[in-house]
Amino acid sequence: MARVKYTNQNEEYAFEFGEWKKEEEIEGVQKLTKPHSLRSVFSRAVTINDRLYIFHNLCTKDPTLPKTLIKHPIRIMDFEKDKLFKVDYINDDSTGNKRGEEKEVKEPILPMTHRVNYSVCKFKNKVYIYGGMNDVIVKTESSSGLSTSSNQILNSMEIFEAITFKFTAVKYRGDLTPQGRQGHAAVIMNQYAMVVIGGTYQDQLIDPTPVPENDSIWSFDLESCQWQRIKVKNQGAGTSDSTSVTGADVVPWNLVHHQAFKLDA
């Protein structure tokens, strides 16, 4: 088993082989991580310029914490150096003046929301992060004054720029957009199209109901930022005994927490 060790001298992470101690695991994970995150620790990753960019449970700006706090929503693995580097984000969530404007308009750089069970796919130096699930704090009116959390299914998208390390929200065009989903997969087909496949509308992490077959596949135009529902045509499809089948029998119905890959053009 390997673990990541931080060195103060070089201000970077490096691999160290050994066994985790139980007290270290509890202190380093359970104390600093939400129970929601512990149930969904499946990270997403893409390769850009021979480096592995690892996205975990994305962390956004937290106004309740000091602006000087450092957040690390992403890690970068360099296999030539055998080291895992961190990217520091200040909690003030800004890069200075927006587009050089005179007014002090802060431009966001951190992820727009907490997000788990989302999809990631990359084209050139851009990583497209779509959908997933968010933890929403709901204030209760009970005498104890405690707040409860509920899960919100997201249909938003943001782009991570590998050159600037910046997260930017995507504004959709047109009236047709897919319903929010989590546990889906996405793949870039070419310079124009990203295809989203499967998922579920539910916030269940175990055995959720998949989306209907007629809403299972969507295409997103990377240039126009418009969505299009893909209808699968299964003309002439049949089984080995020559009996006809419907589209629901051809398109897999249980596409939740799966992966999608492009083999060729």
Image (tube, rainbow, N blue to C red):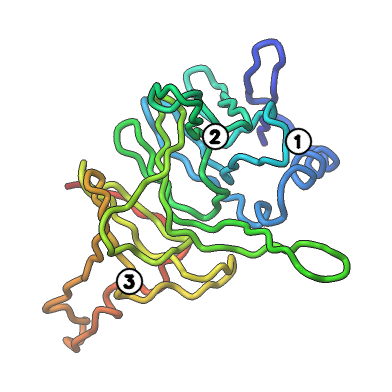
- In the rendered structure, the answer to whether residue 199 lies left or right of residue 110 reads left
What type is the residue that disc 1 sits on? Answer: Glu
| Residue 7 visible to an observer of this rendering | yes
Q: Residue 206: percent from the left, percent from the top?
A: 59, 69
Residue drawn at the location 56% of the way across and 44% of the way down? 58
Can residue 77 be seen by looking at this rendering? no
Residue 237, relative to residue 182: is it above or below? Answer: below
Please give the label number shown on residue 215: 3
Find residue 210 and report its horizontal and vertical position in percent.
Answer: 44, 73
As helix, strand or loop, the secondary structure at mark 1 comes to loop
Q: Is residue 50 left or right of residue 113?
A: left
Which label sits in the foreground, 1 or 2? 2
Q: CA distance from mark 2 to mark 3?
A: 31 Å
Distance of label 3 from label 1 (alpha carbons)? 45 Å
Residue at point 55% right, 72% down? 207
What's under tag 3, amino acid-wise?
Asp
Spot the residue most to the front.
103
Q: Measured along the vertical axis of the image, is residue 210 above or below residue 19?
A: below
Q: Residues within 10 Å of mark 3 (few under 14, many from 20)?
A: some
Q: CA distance from mark 1 to mark 2?
A: 24 Å
- For the residue pair 46 and 237, the one nearer the viewer reads as 46
The residue pinned by badge 1 equals 19
Say which amino acid is labelled 2. Answer: Ile
In front: 170, or 197? 170
Residue, disc 2: 74
User: At 33% across and 68% down in the image, what residue appears?
Assistant: 216
**SS at mark 2?**
strand
Left or right of 69 in this view: 46: left
